Amino acid sequence: MQKRGHESFKEYTQRWRDLAAQVAPPMMEKEMITIIVDTLPVFYYEKMVGYTPSSFADLVFASERIDVGSKRGKFNHPTWTTEKNWGK
């Protein structure tokens, strides 16, 4: 599963979580966090892989902060130019 170009990060994670809720047996929150981080583009993955959020909501908040920081030019990353539409 990947984020669609027009989706916000929050919309993507909601769609992802809705799909994960259909899995039987239910996934633990920590497992959901690990799996969704693995779906992220390199730019986000590099920033999130060392972060251990205590909840799915914390993951969404941190990812939204990455979006804001990237839009403000706070990150200098070569892959951002190829993934710049990911956060829009």
Image (cartoon, rainbow, N blue to C red):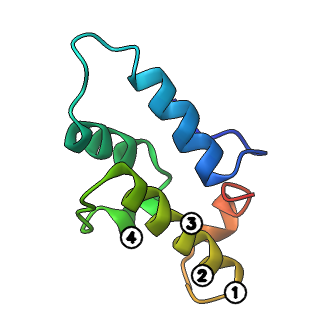
Q: Amino acid at mark 2?
A: Gly
Q: Is residue 59 left or right of residue 85?
A: left
State how far apart marks 4 and 2 are (Cα): 12 Å
State how far apart marks 3 and 1 are (Cα): 12 Å
Upstream in the sequence, badge 3 or badge 4? Answer: 4
Residue under the point 69% across and 39% down:
4
Q: Amino acid at mark 1?
A: Arg
Judged by depth in the image, the label closer to the viewer, 3 or 4, is 3
Upstream in the sequence, badge 4 or badge 2? Answer: 4
Q: Position of residue 2 (x, y in %)?
A: 56, 36
Q: Secondary structure at mark 1?
A: loop
Q: Position of residue 21 (x, y in %)?
A: 39, 22
CB atoms of marks 2 and 1 within 8 Å: yes
Q: Is residue 49 above or below residue 8?
A: below
State how far apart marks 3 and 4 are (Cα): 12 Å
Q: Is residue 73 left or right of residue 56?
A: right
The residue indicated by pointer 2 is 69
The residue indicated by pointer 3 is 64
| The disc label shown at residue 72, or none | 1
